């Protein structure tokens, strides 16, 4: 089965709202732009504050807080805070840990959750509706509430540490990844998305003799670009921001993730400038991921056709 | 074949066309294979969810009937409904319940509507789109430590918000210190923070609406508002359900902002159910009592969510 | 078609399994409890605090070099979340052999069976400041290298300009004098708020910093005669006096209801005139203001000025697989020179007089020597009961409600009710 993939540029122009049609008159467009810029200020200022403050000494951060200079790189600008960050925290290790944990959680999650959503949405499974209902019900429970029983549970599970089977998953990467791979949120999102793809595609493929895995791999997933991008971003965030769980299950700095590192700066005298520097650095991977996935917010449905 | 090259447009016609194949009944051989394959696909997620979600949740709810403590040399004993009696006679619980409901009722329409506005604004192919999308998403990725520090300052009696208000002639209150205004302060901050998150979800939904429908509508002379109500809004049905349910659940689960900004005060005006559960479980070490609050919370949200599903499902059937 | 599906399935299964196995390469080796490969594991809350962590690590390396039987390994945790990590480790039965504990938690952890009593240290510890030794039920469970004190930090120039007397330990500010001083500072118009009590802090700060005022007024968090009830102590007339005074500070505009994120920075930027903070902030202030900085005793609300006591202390876990080694370390580490080392690194008050003589500034007659006096004369340890964590959070909420304008009597009565119920439901921690 070969797919015809048209040029991405063609797709973008063909499926974006035509800029010439239904356009606002000149003042309408200007108003929209003004609104967008105002909103950008409202949403973007804290990040600007954070980055700008990361170059200022602590006293100046708070001294500047009264006016516009809080958002401007004025005064005693230097890289001291960044130097301090690298000095106080095993930064590379933390960053690596967070990236590894988040990427694996998201990557494995994309497979596991989309498979589940596909099955629930396309295949008539006895008990499927109940399964879906139960899965959705787990969305309700916030993590903090079940953290302690989960801790108890992972302490009972067997673990192969390279040479022998020991009990308990504490202080590993596994314990920070595996419990979070299956996500009711992702399943739900994929489910709603798959629901909007017509069954005719499946049926046509079944007539051609394709099995369900084939359909999943070659028809549905290629069409699911926006859903994949959305799920990737929205599951990367909680994985990256994990704080309570690593506190409870990591003991050595070798597997500790970056979020816990913020606490390193909150000793008796909190070093706010260093917190700003640290926070700035750990925001970058998430932003990079977000910008990279922007390309997938493209109406990619018609980019594939079924042939042969 | 037009059906396979224009799949989404076909979905509109799909409802009228009879399926070309006989319906796959569960009892047939094909149905049985399907069921097996289906469960195999579902298996990894099902096993993980069973192990790492259902078991802990079950344990949590089980603890609600015991006098378990976080740190104690004594094992937990079964105490029946004692914890629940304590919960329902606790003033702080009722305050938390009230605050949680108020918060949810306000923020669900507010945040979902504003996030949709944002999504529509950035659902274009113009040059600055990526920039705007990223900026609107920034509050979601900025560290909560920094965000809360900044908002603590903004909300001070002489902070930036009141300064701006005074320029317009309004005397701003002591936002976080006034029991009447604190919850609103938390609402605004939470909406600001999560808006980008739901904007992304709306965006992915908007992407599924083919441009041809817009073109057809504008050819017919529809104004932008008419295009929105007749093309966009119906096309967002699935996304709408998803957003409604997830925003409601997230709103009920409000915890982090309260924990950092107000710790439930002033005078219980911002205490929420989850905050109270965490506080009594982790800080006051009363694990059994906290589990009871969690169980009550779960039942409440389950009822609300089921009601929502029921109400939205009715509309779909009527369409 | 079906075999293809099954093959794909197996392929997927193998990938998942391999990934899982690949992740195992970062496991910790097993070992008897609290140890790792024959080494004794030690936890400290000092991650991110290079000076103090370095001092502790030096003691450990000295110990390891001094003999060949035992080896201690340090694992550092950040302070803010340390207690949660310990609780989780205790729940998982994975506590280290040696660890440090925040003073007020010692009774709670001792009762819970996390700690075992220290042996062979009685004579050594008799020379330590009483607030640095953690005792429960007649047994010693921990000792600390230092204590910290709370002080009213201000600048001589500020006080002189406003005509405020500079108090001493023998003649502290009385309630009226203090109110007067705050009024004068407010009238001068130079400050956003005359004083800053760090009301924006969360967590243990509230009982640590504000229950001493309650005690100075004659009340207390609980009746220390039998630790059964807080009735009379927390809701009696003395407590109500305290509550009204505390509430008055806010309603008169003397302190912020909720101070900013960094009170020390605000003080240094001239936004407040007096800062109620720990002595650990003094170094920073001295750097900026030199000898203009003054550390003053707390205000006397009736029964003498009181401040909090007890800071981080070291103990041995009950599940330690190598008790002999742990006790050997604890004895080694209690030497005066190490006390001096750590206290100096932390900028805090050394626990023994001999150590104080070795730390610049804390020797007899020196600048910071009076802080030792503050500690000896004013410090009141937090209630020595396993119910302390509950008392702490209940008091925090009560104090916050009071500051927010609630009715002190009903608030304190409710707090007493809750505390009593908790003590009772735990069978008074017998």
Image: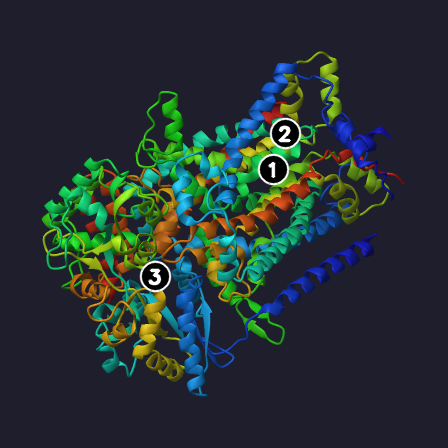
Mark 1, other Cα within 10 Å: few <14 / some 14–19 / many ≥20: some
Q: Which residue is mark 2?
A: B122
Of C296 and C14, the residue lying toward us = C296
Place of residue C4 in the rendered image (x, y in percent of width and height, measured from the top left): 82, 55
Place of residue B207 in the rendered image (x, y in percent of width and height, measured from the top left): 69, 32
Q: Is residue C223 above or below residue C44?
A: above
Labels 3 and 2 touching (C-beta < 8 A): no
Q: Residue at image x 75%, y 60%? A: C10
Which mark is on residue A86? none
Dot 2 or dot 1, earlier in sequence: 2
Q: Quadrant of the N terminus of chain B?
A: top right
> Which quadrant of the structure image shows residue C84?
bottom left
Residue that extends furthest to the bottom in the rendered view of this protein: C68
Dot 3 or dot 2, earlier in sequence: 3
- Labels 3 and 2 in the same subunit: yes
Q: Is residue B91 above or below residue C127?
A: above
Q: CA distance from mark 2 to mark 1?
A: 10 Å
Q: CA distance from mark 3 to mark 1?
A: 52 Å
> Which quadrant of the structure image shows residue A215?
top right
């Amino acid at each position: 089965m070969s797919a015809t993939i048209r040029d991405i540029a063609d797709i973008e122009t063909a499926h974006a709202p035509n800029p010439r049609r239904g356009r606002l008159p000149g003042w309408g467009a200007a108003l929209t732009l003004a609104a967008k810029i105002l909103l950008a200020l409202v949403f973007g200022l804290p990040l600007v504050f954070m980055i700008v403050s990361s170059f200022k000494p602590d006293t100046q951060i708070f001294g500047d807080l009264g006016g516009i200079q809080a958002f401007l790189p004025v005064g005693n600008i230097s890289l001291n805070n960044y130097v301090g960050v690298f000095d106080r925290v095993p930064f590379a290790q933390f960053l690596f840990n967070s990236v590894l944990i988040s990427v694996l959680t998201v990557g494995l999650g994309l497979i596991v959750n989309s498979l589940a959503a596909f099955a629930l949405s396309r295949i008539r499974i006895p008990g499927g509706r109940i399964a879906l209902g139960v899965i959705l019900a787990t969305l309700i429970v916030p993590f903090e509430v079940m953290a302690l029983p989960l801790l108890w549970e992972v302490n009972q599970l067997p673990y192969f540490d390279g040479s022998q089977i020991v009990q308990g998953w504490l202080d590993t990467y596994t314990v920070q990844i595996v419990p979070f791979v299956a996500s009711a949120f992702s399943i739900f999102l994929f489910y709603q998305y798959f629901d909007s793809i017509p069954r005719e595609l499946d049926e046509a493929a079944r007539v051609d003799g394709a099995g369900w895995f084939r359909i999943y791999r070659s028809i549905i997933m290629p069409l699911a670009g926006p859903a994949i991008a959305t799920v990737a971003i929205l599951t990367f965030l909680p994985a990256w921001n994990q704080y309570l769980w690593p506190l409870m299950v990591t003991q050595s700095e070798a597997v500790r993730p970056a979020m816990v590192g913020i606490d390193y700066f909150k000793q008796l005298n909190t070093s706010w400038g260093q917190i700003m520097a640290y926070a700035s650095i750990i925001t970058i991977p998430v932003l990079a991921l977000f910008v990279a996935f922007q390309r997938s917010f493209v109406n990619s449905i018609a980019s594939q056709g079924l042939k042969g | 074949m037009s059906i396979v090259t224009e799949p989404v447009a076909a979905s509109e016609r799909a409802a009228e066309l009879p399926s070309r194949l006989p319906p796959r009944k569960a009892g047939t051989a094909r149905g049985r294979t399907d069921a097996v394959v289906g469960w195999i696909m579902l298996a990894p997620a099902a096993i993980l969810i069973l192990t790492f979600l259902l078991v802990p949740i079950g344990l949590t709810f089980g603890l609600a009937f015991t006098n378990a403590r976080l740190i104690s040399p004594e094992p937990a004993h079964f105490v029946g409904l004692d914890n629940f009696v304590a919960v329902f006679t606790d003033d702080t619980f009722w305050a938390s319940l009230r605050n949680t409901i108020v918060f949810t009722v306000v923020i669900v329409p507010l945040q979902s509507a504003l996030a949709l506005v944002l999504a529509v604004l950035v659902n274009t192919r113009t040059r600055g789109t990526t920039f705007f999308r990223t900026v609107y998403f920034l509050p979601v990725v900025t560290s909560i430590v920094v965000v809360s520090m900044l908002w603590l300052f903004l909300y001070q009696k002489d902070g930036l918000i009141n300064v701006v208000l005074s320029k317009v002639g309004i005397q701003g209150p002591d936002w976080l210190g006034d029991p009447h205004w604190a919850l609103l302060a938390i609402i605004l901050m939470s909406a600001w923070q999560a808006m980008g998150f739901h904007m992304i979800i709306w965006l992915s939904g908007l992407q599924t609406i083919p441009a041809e429908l817009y073109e057809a509508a504008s050819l017919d002379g529809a104004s932008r508002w008419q295009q929105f109500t007749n093309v966009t809004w119906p096309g967002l049905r699935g996304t709408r359900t998803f957003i409604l349910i997830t925003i409601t659940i997230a709103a009920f689960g409000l915890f982090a902002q309260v924990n950092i900004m107000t710790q439930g005060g002033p005078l219980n005006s911002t205490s929420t159910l989850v905050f109270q559960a965490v506080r009594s479980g982790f800080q006051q070490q009363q694990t059994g009592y906290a589990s009871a609050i969690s169980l009550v919370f779960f039942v409440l949200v389950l009822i609300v969510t089921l009601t929502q599903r029921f109400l939205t499902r009715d509309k779909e059937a009527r369409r | 078609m079906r075999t293809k599906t099954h093959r794909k399935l197996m392929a997927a299964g193998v990938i998942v399994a391999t990934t899982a196995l690949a992740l195992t390469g970062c496991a910790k080796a097993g070992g008897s409890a609290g140890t790792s490969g024959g080494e004794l594991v030690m936890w400290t809350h000092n991650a991110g605090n290079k000076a103090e962590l370095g001092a502790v690590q030096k003691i450990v390396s000295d110990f390891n070099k001094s003999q060949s039987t035992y080896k201690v390994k340090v694992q550092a945790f950040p302070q803010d979340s340390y207690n949660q990590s310990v609780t989780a480790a205790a729940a998982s039965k994975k506590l280290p052999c040696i660890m440090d504990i925040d003073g007020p938690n010692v009774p709670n952890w001792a009762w819970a069976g996390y700690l075992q009593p220290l042996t062979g240290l009685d004579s050594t510890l008799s020379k330590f400041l009483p607030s640095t030794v953690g005792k429960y039920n007649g047994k010693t469970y921990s000792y600390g290298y230092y204590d910290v004190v709370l002080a009213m930090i201000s600048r001589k120039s500020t006080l002189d300009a406003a005509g405020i007397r500079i108090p001493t330990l023998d003649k502290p500010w009385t309630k009226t004098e203090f109110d007067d001083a705050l009024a004068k500072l407010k009238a001068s118009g130079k400050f956003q708020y005359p004083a800053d009590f760090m009301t924006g802090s969360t967590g243990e700060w509230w009982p640590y910093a504000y229950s001493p005022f309650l005690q100075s007024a004659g009340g207390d968090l609980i009746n220390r005669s039998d630790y059964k009830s807080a009735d009379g102590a927390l809701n009696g007339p003395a407590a109500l006096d305290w509550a009204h005074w505390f509430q008055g500070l806010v309603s008169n505009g003397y302190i912020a209801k909720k101070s900013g994120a960094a009170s020390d920075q605000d003080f240094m930027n001239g936004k407040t005139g007096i800062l109620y903070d720990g002595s650990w902030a003094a170094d920073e202030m001295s750097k900026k203001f030199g000898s203009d900085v003054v550390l003053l005793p707390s205000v006397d609300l009736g029964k003498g000025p009181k401040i909090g006591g007890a800071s981080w202390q070291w103990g041995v876990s009950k599940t330690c697989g190598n008790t002999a080694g742990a006790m050997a370390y604890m004895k080694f580490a209690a030497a005066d020179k190490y006390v001096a080392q750590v206290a100096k690194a932390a900028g805090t008050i050394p626990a023994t007089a001999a150590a104080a003589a070795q730390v610049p500034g804390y020797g007899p007659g020196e600048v910071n020597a009076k802080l030792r006096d503050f500690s000896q004369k004013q410090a009141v340890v937090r209630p020595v009961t396993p119910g302390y964590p509950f008392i702490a959070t209940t008091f925090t909420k009560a104090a916050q409600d009071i500051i927010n304008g609630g009715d002190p009597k009903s608030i304190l009565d409710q707090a007493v009710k809750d505390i009593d119920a908790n003590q009772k439901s735990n069978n008074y921690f017998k």
